[in-house]
């Protein structure tokens, strides 16, 4: 009888060391992107679609991919909301926002630059998923908005911070009025 109990105990110990597979579930929240909504400057409660918006990070040659089209079209969006990544290393991320990108009439193409200032904090998610980073926009100076190298009128009329804490992509963090 003691041998059977000892055998059961030994089997129980051997199975207790087994772990589930270390696979990160696709539904696990990861590092969130900055969600930007575009609004009508003259009617601030109305979402407004941008026209052929191209967003390029500082030091990058290609824009952020917004759709599955081929060629330069994959870098353009015509929606009223976009999500862009912030750098996880450092405390700033700069982007150029070009409205009417690729338009054959250069007078209609307008580029503004926006630099976002924030703090980043790494959070442990799990052994399988690793870490994610959450961001908090600087409370005194969350962004700097400048015109492009070719000075013209800024197409972005106003920027409003809606949520300083960027912990998920379920809400609009920044509103851009144009």
Image: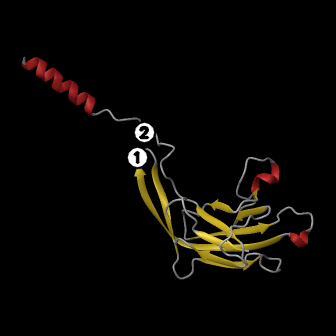
Which sits in the foreground, 114 or 47? 47
Residue for point 75% across, 74% down = 112
Q: Could you tell me if the residues under marks 1 and 2 are in contact, i.e. CB atoms within 8 Å?
A: yes
Q: How many marks?
A: 2
SS of the residue at dot 2?
A: loop
Task: Quarter of the image for the C terminus: give it.
Answer: bottom right
Image quadrant where residue 170 sits:
bottom right
- The numbered mark at residue 22 is 2
Task: In the rendered view, tell whether residue 33 sits above or below residue 38.
Answer: above
According to the picture, the residue beneath numbered tag 1 turns out to be 127
Q: Earlier in the sequence, mark 1 or mark 2?
A: 2
SS of the residue at dot 1?
A: loop
Task: In the rendered view, tell whether residue 104 sits above or below residue 1.
Answer: below
Q: Tag 1: Cα neighbours inside 10 Å, few (<14), some, or many (≥20)? A: few
Is 32 left or right of 81, judged from the image as shown?
left
Which sits in the foreground, 54 or 36? 36
Return the x and y of residue 89 as percentages of the image width and height: 54, 64
**Marks 1 and 2, how far apart at CA:** 7 Å
Return the x and y of residue 4 as percentages of the image width and height: 12, 18
Is 38 left or right of 162, judged from the image as shown?
right
Q: Residue furthest bottom?
A: 140
Q: Residue furthest right?
A: 105
Residue for point 73% across, 75% down = 156
Return the x and y of residue 73 as percentages of the image width and height: 80, 53
């Amino acid at each position: 009888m003691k041998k059977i109990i000892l055998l059961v105990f030994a089997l129980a110990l051997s199975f207790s060391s087994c772990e589930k597979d270390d696979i990160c579930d696709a539904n696990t929240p990861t590092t969130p992107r900055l969600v930007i909504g575009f609004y009508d400057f003259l009617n601030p409660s109305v979402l407004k679609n941008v026209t052929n918006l191209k967003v390029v990070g500082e030091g990058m040659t290609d824009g952020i991919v917004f759709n599955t089209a081929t060629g330069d079209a994959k870098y353009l969006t015509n929606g009223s909301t976009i999500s862009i990544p912030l750098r996880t290393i450092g405390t700033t991320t700069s982007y150029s926002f070009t409205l009417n990108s690729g338009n054959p009439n250069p007078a209609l193409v307008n580029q503004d630059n926006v630099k976002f200032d924030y703090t980043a904090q790494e959070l442990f998610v799990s052994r399988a998923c690793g870490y994610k980073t959450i961001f908090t926009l600087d409370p005194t100076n969350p962004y700097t908005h400048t015109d492009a190298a070719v000075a013209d009128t800024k197409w972005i009329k106003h920027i409003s911070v809606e949520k300083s804490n960027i912990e998920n992509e379920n809400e609009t963090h920044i509103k851009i009025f144009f």
